[in-house]
Image (cartoon, rainbow, N blue to C red):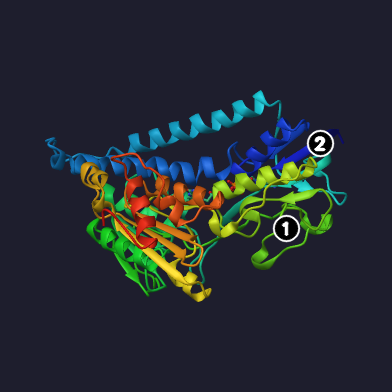
Amino acid sequence: MADQQFDCVVVGSGPGGYVAAIRAAQLGMKTAVVEKDVVGGRCLNYACIPAKAILRTADVLTEIREASDFGITVGEPEVDFGAVQVRRDRVIKTLTGGVSGLFKKNEITYIEGAGSLTADGNVKVGDDTLAASKCVVLATGSVKRHIPGLEFGGNVIGTEEAWALSELPKTMIVIGAGASGTEIASAYARMGTEVTLYEGLDRVLPTEDADISKLAARSFKKQGIDAKTSTFYEGQEADWIVIAAGRGPDVEGLGLDAAGVKLAENGLIAVDGALRTSAAKIYAIGDLVPGPALAHKASDEGIIAVEDAAGLSTHPISYPDIPRATFCTPNVASFGLTEEQAKAAGHDVVVGKVQYGAVGAGTVYGDRTGLVKVVGDKKYGELLGGHIIGAKATELIQELVNAKALEGGFPEVARMIHGHPTLSEAVMEAARAADGWVIHG
Ligand SMILES: Cc1cc2nc3c(=O)[nH]c(=O)nc-3n(C[C@H](O)[C@H](O)[C@H](O)COP(=O)(O)OP(=O)(O)OC[C@H]3O[C@@H](n4cnc5c(N)ncnc54)[C@H](O)[C@@H]3O)c2cc1C
């Protein structure tokens, strides 16, 4: 048995693992990354990135269809789905190649194989043991989960497979109208697939603010999506049935028990604020641990974990304030509390709502129906939440996230100068509306 000595061994090379490894190496740790599949993790290879590459195709298609509004005459565009998938693969390869390049640049050892913990908190890959003097970072992500009464197999697939189809389906059923489900529905419906979207709760995007769900539902209808809310799937037929209703941590074969790593609820790994597990020098991050299952959350946790292992005092994460982005059309993005949650939490709630059409950019760029909603607490002007639907919402939300992180409230956002004509002026106006005054709105 060959023994290799490292300071830090990271298991999994997704956005949690690869970022942890790079930061560890930057902090002077001799670092290895173990990956059982392909570099970049699920995010880059099967999930976030392929999804966004195909959504981008659907967005370009929508723009071409709406070109006449901008004075351009074009015929009805055709989707060459083979070429769409070729581009998707190219995007993935470019980005995963970038991660490999960063590993080389930072002198990180990349080891192919499935890693598992040894009883003394090191990592085993096949017959090799990788000793880690400072930390082991578990970053093995999550896997799809079926729903009761419906197993995967045949034409029943998960979200990752839905983004890797070789032909454009004629019909598709999507179960679950959360972020992943609505992205799939919105992309395929616009490319010509007949999509039925099932949601057991009473609205699409049920974790978003109710005003946002309402506007999203209106737009999905226009895209031809048959969204059935308060309805459970009951065996209807389609070319593909996509289960987009939850995932679970990928802990199989990791040897958590042997190493003394304890679980929290839902089979996730229990960690403290620095992502330390119950076992000495073992950290767990990303989809393995509680909090929103998002790539940027995984990356930030990776940084915190290895900085802690290096003995640095690192930053805390405010989990509710992590930006959440859904790249369906229209884009949806949010952070913090919804209006309903803020009221339930006993805040003296104030709300500012402004449509994109209130500011010049909404009309110039062709999205007047987008909406920015700021939820605040009246007393000190605290920003409790931000909710945006419309073009570039996924970019615009960051301003409110940053303002809050820098301890700014909505009165500060209301009085910061925003460039003109930009959609960010609608964010400023929504903050002004929360502050009790508004110029355009
Ligand atoms: C369809 C879809 C779309 C999504 N879109 C977005 C989005 O737009 N934005 C966003 O923020 N989030 C998105 N997510 C969520 C995001 O993909 C995850 O939150 C993110 O990938 C978690 O990163 P991670 O590093 O924890 O794990 P992963 O990306 O899952 O990577 C884990 C890696 O560990 C490897 N591994 C597992 N076990 C072992 C082992 N024993 N030994 C060695 N290697 C192992 C796996 O092969 C994998 O490569 C999406 C998810 C899905 C399913």
Residue occupying image coordinates x 28% and y 47%: 191
Residue 156: tell me if it is visible.
Answer: no
Q: Position of residue 298 (x, y in %)?
A: 61, 48
Query: Foreground residue, 306 or 51?
Result: 306
Distance in Å between CA atoms under marks 1 and 2: 21 Å
Q: Position of residue 258 (x, y in %)?
A: 83, 56
In this rendering, the answer to whether 76 lies above or below 211 is above
Residue bearing the label numbered 1:
271
Q: Position of residue 301 (x, y in %)?
A: 65, 48
Q: Give residue 321's quadrant in the image.
A: bottom right
In this rendering, the answer to whether 155 lies above or below 38 is below
Task: Kindly identify the amino acid type of the residue bearing the numbered disc 1.
Answer: Val
Looking at the figure, which quarter contains the N terminus? top right
Looking at the figure, which quarter contains the C terminus? bottom left
Q: Position of residue 215 (x, y in %)?
A: 30, 62
Residue bearing the label numbered 2:
7
Query: Foreground residue, 254 or 138?
Result: 138
User: Which is more N-terminal, label 2 or label 1?
Assistant: 2
Give SS at disc 1. Answer: loop
Left or right for 179, reference 102? left
Task: Kindly identify the amino acid type of the residue bearing the numbered disc 2.
Answer: Asp
Query: Foreground residue, 412 or 314?
Result: 412
